[in-house]
Amino acid sequence: MTEPNQESGAATSRKALAINLDRTAYGAFAEIGAGQEVVRHFFKAGGASGTVAKSISAYDMRVSDAIYGHPKRYVSQERLEKMLDHEFSLLVDRLAADRGAQTRFFAFADTVATTPHDGKGQGHSWIGMRFQDQPLAEPSEVVLHLRLWDKDAGRQQDALGIVGVNLIHAALNHRETVDQFLMALVDDVGAGRVEVEFANFRGPAFGSFDNRATALRLVRLGLTDAVLFGPEGQPQVPSEYFYKKSVLVARGSFRPVSLVNEDMLACALRSVPQTGPDFVALFEMCIGSDPHPESELIDRIRLVGAMQHPLLVTRHRGWYRLPAYFRMHTTGTITLVAGMNNLVDLFNPEYYTHLDGGVLEACGRLFKDGVRIMVYPMRGDQLRRLILDPVACKVCFPDSYGHVEADSVVTASDIQMLPAVAGLFQHLLNNKFLVPITGADEKALACQPRTLAERIKNNTPGWENEVPPSVVIAIKSLKLWSN
């Protein structure tokens, strides 16, 4: 990892100086956990008296609690919101009478946990700003959760300071488009050092910003590998949502949610020995190579929300990346639910050309720490169609499957594999890394989810029988896939 260069420091200083010379912007800075990393740029740039009304760093927990209240977790959205509430209200109460008519007041805050000296743990930060986009305006707010990927605390502090200056500069000056705002956050620091895994906007300054679309842009722009939508379809913070939870996740494309998706999750849940408040069942959708417009992706998120299920949207097609992602957030068990067609993805060597060990290395990464995949069965007629796919025939299945009865139910323990992967496949079955699902619903097995969107578009009779009732209602009320 290279050290910050002089040019990047100069760019950050120019932004800080520009804000200092803008006599309409005046604010308070509150930073906890990594020093005064953001406000120091304004002091170093010169003219900070034009910007900084107050700077505070309440390091001692008792001092911090006395000012902002006692939170469940110190580096959390709850603590950040209380910091912004307190500092913005105090600033306006004290100064509005004297300079409110010509001043855009703001409060900037961050609460940070850098990597400790022993190197264990991942640096992260909650960072945000509440501000007026013009004098006397109602306040707007932007809240971010960052992951700090540098290996040592000093470089994480440096990165945080740059992002903080970027955030203030963008909030005051660059709100034309979501993409412009988001990319400005990592100016001169890069997504390799700082991951933006959550962003939430509200208030009149962000009138055209939609938080669901923003979450998708974080993935599309490469600022994060995954974003999470809660059961109501709104963005959530993965590190808080999955904290110490066991996870059951079913992959799909959800064009739209079908009875197959619903039954996959239901069958897997029946096989899980223990659920409860420390257990999360959710869907996962990979959009890394999805060609459809983001408006449709948002519609799919809405439809999953109609079923009251969380949805993780990712950009990596390789399954082996999912456990590593969840391991950043939880020490609980991880169970993946797959369709028979996902076995093609699992054993396709073209997805692992960047790994020295290819498919074997990918499986080693995927199945460590007790991870397992539960495999949903397939009807014989659907398996016949799958085998006609040239990739499936090349990677997994011999062409001796033509004799499979159309109405038969084929489980993972029944299928034949090509000799190149048969030994590995049997090893995974024998050691219960791959677990065949039984007892699937016959109505769900008869569905054709891959053609659903086209049949809905063409108003083909009978598509409603393959979709959960709540999703049918949502599709019709939103006029999705209609001509």
Image (tube, rainbow, N blue to C red):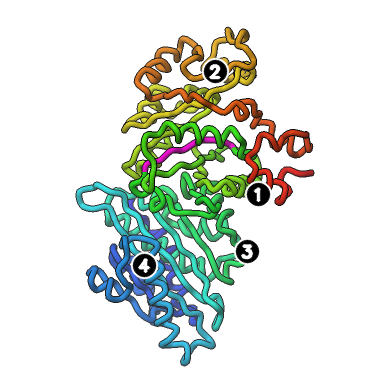
Q: CA distance from mark 1 to mark 4?
A: 36 Å
Tell which of 98 and 476 is nearer to you: 476
Foreground tag (2 vs 3): 2
Q: Earlier in the sequence, mark 4 or mark 3?
A: 4
Amino acid type, residue under disc 2 in the picture: Val
Residue 196 in sight here = no
Vertical comparison of 129 with 431: above or below: below
Q: Earlier in the sequence, mark 2 or mark 4?
A: 4
| Residue 458, quarter of the rendered image | top right
Q: Residue at x 36, y 60 (%)?
A: 76
Instruction: Determine which of the numbered discs, if any, sits on residue 295 in the image.
Output: 1
Q: Is residue 250 magenta?
A: yes
Residues shaded magenta: 246-253
Q: From the image, tell me which residue sits under label 2.
A: 410
Pointer 3 local density, CA inside 10 Å: few below 14, some 14–19, many at least 20: few
Q: Earlier in the sequence, mark 1 or mark 4?
A: 4
Foreground tag (4 vs 3): 3
- Residue 74: percent from left, percent from top: 31, 62
Foreground tag (1 vs 4): 1
- Residue 50: percent from left, percent from top: 42, 81
The reply to whether dot 1 and dot 2 touch (C-beta < 8 Å) is no
Amino acid type, residue under disc 1 in the picture: Ser
Q: Is residue 171 magenta?
A: no
Amino acid type, residue under disc 3 in the picture: Ser
Q: CA distance from mark 4 to mark 3?
A: 28 Å
Q: Check disc 2 and report its element: helix, strand or loop.
A: strand
Q: CA distance from mark 1 to mark 3?
A: 15 Å
Q: From the image, tell me which residue sits under label 3.
A: 208
Q: From the image, tell me which residue sits under label 4.
A: 38
Q: Earlier in the sequence, mark 1 or mark 3?
A: 3
Foreground tag (2 vs 4): 2
Q: CA distance from mark 1 to mark 2?
A: 36 Å
